[in-house]
Image: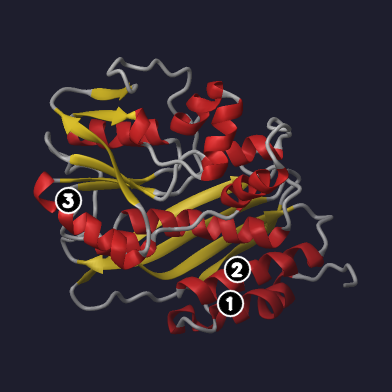
Amino acid sequence: MTSHKTGEFERIERLFAPLAAGFPGALGLTDDAALIRPTDGHELVVTTDTVVAGVHYIGDESPDLVARKLLRMNLSDLASMGARPVAYTLNVALPSDLEDDWLEAFTQGLAMDQAEFGISLAGGDSVSTPGPVTLTVTAFGEVPAGRALRRSGARPGDVVFVSGTIGDGALGLKVQRGLLPALPQAQQDVLTARYRLPRPRLGCGVGLRGIAHAAIDVSDGMVADLGHIADTSGVAARIDAASVPLSEAASAALALDPALRDAVLGGGDDYELLFTVPPASVGRVAALSQALALPLTAIGAIEPGQGVRVLGADGAEIALATRGFTHR
């Protein structure tokens, strides 16, 4: 591919307009704004994420993976609200010396995930920056009115569940930084893939409508994100560390270095769903797990009080050096 740079309007027509073809409200990206009309009886769900090269991703990832992870981060937020994806906007701030081949690969990644997850571009903005690549997606979803999953509904006695496996994202980042050299290459590859390309649990989020009292996606770290539910709901939470589901790769990493436990429990970038359900609905969670072919594992409970306790197999509280990512 020959490297070259094009002007803003040619770039929009050549690279971005095809991404908007599946969403009539984008108006072909020829107007100042898009039109979004939710289905009758539904509410719009809106979320946004920004990533900066060298801060939120290492910088050596292929552009298509950067694009797909950025979109999936937002899709995970929609999943945590029980929403169905509708459309998204994209803002890109790019260094003036960035060649078009980077942006072409970036948009190809978006096209792949648009096709997989049923979402289209609705608009956005493109500017130059003297700083690093800065990318923002704002995603729109819809959910039946009054049925959105919230962080604020957890109640004492609820069972805490998590989807998939925990810790792979944080361990994958360590692999990328060369911090797990003793781990076999095949397991390093598994963790790297989980870090670079998480799986938004959209089907799980929709399936939890009317079942879950509260939900959140695991982006900052499982302990911290359960803390967000506890704080918003005015309750306390308990995690039984031995019950937290781990992949074979994460288990192998922990066997080599038990000190990685903090990264597993408090690391981020898993983008699994963490949710609470009343005991009477545990059977419905099991049925959903079977229907989705997705593990949904009970890892603790909601209690009166405040804060999150992590208990070991002996019932003693575990003190974690880090409980999750803090935004500054």
- Identify the residue position indicated by label 2 in the image: 110
Residue 32 seen by the camera: no
The image's mark for residue 167 is none
Task: Please state which amino acid type lies under the numbered disc 3.
Answer: Val
**Residue shown at the point (40%, 36%) measured from the top left:** 222
- Identify the residue position indicated by label 1 in the image: 19
Residues packed near mark 1 inside 10 Å, few (<14), some (14 to 19) or many (20 plus): many
The image's mark for residue 282 is 3
Q: Are marks 2 and 1 in contact (CB under 8 Å)?
A: yes
Q: Residue furthest toward the right? A: 2
**Residue shown at the point (44%, 71%) measured from the top left:** 87
Task: Please state which amino acid type lies under the numbered disc 1.
Answer: Leu
Mark 2 or 1, nearer chain start? 1
**Residue shown at the point (74%, 69%) measured from the top left:** 104
Say which element carries label 1: helix
User: Residue 290: percent from the left, percent from the top?
Assistant: 30, 63
Residue 312 appears left or right of 280: right
